[in-house]
Image: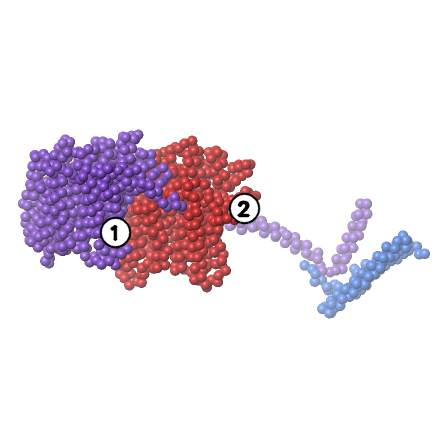
Chain colours: A blue, B purple, C red
Amino acid sequence: MIRLPLVLVFSALLFSAGVYGVLARRNAVMVLMAIELMLNAVNVNLIAFAAQLKDVGGQVFALFVIAVAAAEVGIGLAIVILLFRNRESINVDEVSLLKW
Amino acid sequence: MVGVLAAETAEGAEHAAAAANWFVQNAWLIPLLPFISGVLTLAFGRRTPGKGPVYGILAVFAALVLSLGVLWSFVQGGGPYERTADWFTVGPLHLEAGILVDGLTAVMVVVVTFVSLMVHVYSIGYMHGDVRYTWFYVVLSLFTGAMLLVVVSNNVIQLLVGWEIMGVCSYLLIGHWFEERTNSNAAIKAFITTRIGDVPMMFGFFALIAATGFTTTNIGETTEAIAHGEVSTLFVTAAALLLFGGTIGKSAQFPLHVWLPDAMAGPTPVSALIHAATMVAAGVYLVGRLFEVFVVAGEDVLFVVSVVAAITMLGAAILAIAQDDIKRVLAYSTLSQLAYMVAGLSLGEEGFTAGFFHLFTHAFFKALLFLGAGAVIHAVHSNDMSDMGGLRKSMPVTFWTMLIGSLALAGIVPFAGFWSKDELLVVANDTGTTWLFVMFLGTAFVTAFYTARMVLLTFFGEFRGHGHPHEAPASMTGPLVLLAAATVGVGVLGAPQLGAVFSEWVYFGHPHEAHFVMWIAAISTLGAVLGIAGGWALYRQRKDPDPMQQALGPVWTVLVHRYYIDDFYMAAIVRPIRDRVSAGIDWINQNVIDGVVNGAALLTRALSRVVAWVDRNVIDGAANAAGGVTGTTGGLLKYLQSGNVQWYAVVLFVGVIALTIVFTRVA
Amino acid sequence: MTWENSAITITTFLPLVGALVIMFVPKDRDRLIRGLAIAVTGVALVFAIAIAVGFDYGTDGLQYELNAAWIDAINVRYHVGIDGISMPLYVLTFLLAFLCAIYTWRFLPEPGRPKVFVSLMLLLITGMAGTFISFDLILFFVFWELVLVPMYFLIGIWGSANREYAAIKFFLFTLFGSIFMLLGFLGMYFRSDVGGQHTFDMLELQRFAQGGGFTEGFQLVVFGAIALGLAVKVPMWPVHTWLPDAHTEAPTIGSVLLAGIMLKMGTYGFIRIAIPLLPEGARAYAPWIGLLAAIGIVYAALACLAQRDLKRLIAFSSVGHMGFVMLGIATMTEIGFQAAIFGMVAHGVITGMLFFNVGSIYDRYHTREIAAIGGGMSQKMPKLASTFAYVSIASLGLPGLAGFWGEVMALLSSFNPNAALGLDEGLFRVFMVLGGIGTILTAGYFLWMLQRVNMGTLPDRWKDAPLADTLAIEWLSWVPLLLLIVVLGLYPRLVFGMTDEAVAGIVENLTRFFGG
């Protein structure tokens, strides 16, 4: 039996790595992967609490998140590919069309 | 609807006298026939052989026969007769169509139809080849019908209808040859001048109607109401004077006499009709028909009437001396003779019969004179007596008949004019109206003088015109002969020696016994003879210039200008109103009243420009300012949206953390 | 729905329906459009005559009445009906409409466009006819204003040179007046109290007023406001100046309908609304109305003498004739009211006919300047000249023709105004004398006009001009009027008989109100 605090610390680290990736990386694929890290950190949390509280709801949520993440990556990668086709670059700093 | 359309056929009360014969009961046919013939002539005249006179002549002849039948009833001693039918109702006022036949009516219808018939026949010759021959007969018939309508009316409104139709017919007839400006001017002058008299007369009628409380227009009832009703003396006096206005206009008394001489512009048969039997006689008839009002109004009103008559009588007779136009001589003579009649009526009940007897005789001899003058004009193609002279040889019938007419006018026994003039003198003497007696006598002298002048200048001496004048055709001489016969004959109806039957037909109140006063007859004859002698002395041979012109000097100039009365009216009334007052009113309309309107419009437009400026700069300014502020703010805030997704994420995370801290603290 | 309660609604709106139908006809089907107009107005005329024939003239109440809910919120009702006062005007409206439609078959001024012209004419007719049958103030006002728009376009599009000015002047002037009228109506509405409710119904308002519902001060104000609106339409001096301009510029049809019917809406309003609903106001204003009427008569006659434009002259003569109508109304007597209504009808027939004549004269000469015509019309066009002279003489009030009765009865009534109202006899006799002077001047200008147009010799410049005498289509549209002039003159009972009972009712109420 793994103790809960250890798991929580792990997921917090994983999440922070994700946040860093999202805010700092310039490569759009890397940003997407960072988002996956953040989602999985949440999943770890959900599973841990479910085990601790003997509530299956957390596991169910984790499954939902995995499904949503899969869809998100699908759409996200499609956007990235289109972006690349149009701009020949996937540097997110260069994509600032939606401004004033 | 039926109630509106159908006049109740029930006839009003028939004041039937036992002796009223068929002709009297159906006297309404007399005015109707000429009206019908007028319409028929208008509709079919042009297509009828002879171009139309046939309808008028037949109708007027039938009317004459009916009229004689009516008169026959009175010869037999019949009494007055009234018959009415409902016409329409206006509020309380009940209007009837009706006839009132008494001795006066009977005499008048005979005179009117007889003279009119003569004129109708005469015009066949006189108007032959005229541009509007058929039209002439249309109006002539309507004119006769209108006069007859006046004569038989039993109520004032119906009388007014006839009266005004007559006015418009006179306008059409006087202006018959309207291509000439002077003729149409004369026509307008006649209509407007008489209308100036008609309007007061209408008000007089209103007074009569008002006296009955606006219930009836019947002549008998209204005069009764005014005589015995609860109306003030002032009211009656005013009513009588207003009514007399109609007479002044239609019978061409001073100061509205100016239209009559100008009315000579019409064809001569028309002049005969206007001057003898219709139109001018209507004015005198009006006074006679409403005599009760004048009698009740009393001495003062009758005095006014007599003064007006006296002025006209002598003034017009003197003017006749200075005329070169044969028709104008006769026109002024008509004025003067009408004044005789009016003056006779002004003498009250006694003068009533005498006045109308003069109207009766005058109708015949004046028609004769005019038609004779027409024959002369027809022959020499000029109205001017300086183009005439010596015509007694070439136109014997015209000469002899006109001589008879002239002697009647001059008042020579035994012609008609003598008897009627003598009657008037007798009445003036009986009533003690000496000044009027003198006026009568003086006028008789002047009348004889100008009549002699006219006959001498026309028929005696040498012919001064062009061409070869010849006698008129039979259609013209026939009426002349008939009228001459009448002129000789009708005098006896009023001759006291022969019973004076006329006074049994036409009287006011009770029959007035006519009598003969030898010295008066002698004086009047003397006056007439002197007048003729004077004329003979001066005009046996025409001299140029006129002997009277030398004798009178500047006075002659005044006479030639008709006392400057016409000029005065033209300069002081007609032209100012027509040209200046009307122009002034129009100016006021365009510049003052419409100026206010246009000014209001301009003011509104100026105001609207101000409003538009305020709207654009103040109100719209505020709206624009609000937009501007928003725009500026947005312009500043836009920089927050960089488009860099990661920058948004940074803000998001910072925000979440900040909120977490805040809420943790609060909790 | 029975004939009894729908007859006047059908008749009144028939022209409107006709206008709607014509809107679906292609505009190049010229003859069809004009033919439809004749047909529609003809049927409407037949209906109107049928209504007149079926009318019971023995009573003074409303007949063919229909009183339906319309705008409940403010208690406005579709209340129509017809009585003796409305009847002659109602029939006259459709008669003139029919004749105008016939006239339009041949005569249509620049710029043509028969479809629009005819539609507007039909719309105008519905508006005018509706005014005479409305017994609800708001309904009355709607019809009243409905008339403005088509007439504005008729003048503004088909008028002569100065048409825009005239059209705008006409529109604004009338609108200016009718706003005051509307305020007056609203004032009466808010003051009225019939079973705890405000009302616009004329009959209910009349009963309310008869019971002393309106205070004197209120009546003075409201009568003034309403009278102003009506007076502009009549038009009374000095608010008449739109009329000569409107008439001069309007096309012939417009002038005929304007003079023939539209002016009567104002005088009708006095008899129908202002006087019965506001008796105190009527009493106070009667001398002033009489004064303005008398001034108008003399003033218009003098102004006529100065006119150089034939049509303008006739237009000014209308001001004088309507002065007689108003003088009759001002006396507040039965004779006066009767005279007024007769005068309206007679003026509609005579002046309508005069405008037809002048329209045809213009059609021949292409000028209306009297001096340019230069006389001699009788030589070149004897028939046209004769009808013109005939109608002119009728217009100057010759007895035996229609114009006489209205004038003479109006003058007669002013000899003794209604004593129950305490109107000053002397004052009204002064008005009568002024009116009498007016008749002399009227004769003067008409005869002078005839002298300058008809008489004399034809000037050289017209000698070879193709001046055609009266055409068949003109006879067709004129003969009814020419006959009516003489029929009304000889048989005035035709109108007096219609109006008798209704007028008696109004005057009786008035007299009873003042305790007479």
Instruction: State the image coordinates of residue B135 (x, y, percent, origin top left).
Output: 24, 54
Give the crowd class for mark 2: few <14, some 14-19, many >=20 residues within 10 Å: few
Q: Is residue C137 above or below residue C254?
A: above
Please name the residue that numbered disc 1 is placed on: B37
Residue at the (72%, 64%) spot, across then down: A95
Q: Is residue C305 above or below residue B646?
A: above
The quarter of the image holding the C terminus of chain C is top left
Instruction: State the image coordinates of residue B154 (x, y, percent, origin top left).
Output: 27, 40
Judge by depth and name the residue closer to the eye, A63 or C447.
C447
Q: Please state if C420 lies on the left or on the right of C7 as rendered.
A: left
Say what secondary structure mark 2 lies in. Answer: strand
Residue at the (20%, 49%) spot, across then down: B61
Which labelled disc corresponds to residue C498?
Answer: none
Instruction: State the image coordinates of residue C509 (x, y, percent, origin top left).
Output: 43, 36
Q: Quadrant of residue B642?
A: bottom right
Q: Amino acid at mark 1?
A: Ser
Q: Please state if C72 lies on the left or on the right of B435 as rendered.
A: right
Q: Do callouts 2 and 1 point to residues on the same chain?
A: no
Q: Please state if B253 lies on the left or on the right of C99 as rendered.
A: left
Please name the residue that numbered disc 2 is placed on: C70
Whether residue C475 is visible here, answered yes or no, is yes
Q: Is residue C300 above or below residue C99?
A: above
Residue at the (24%, 34%) spot, across then down: B292
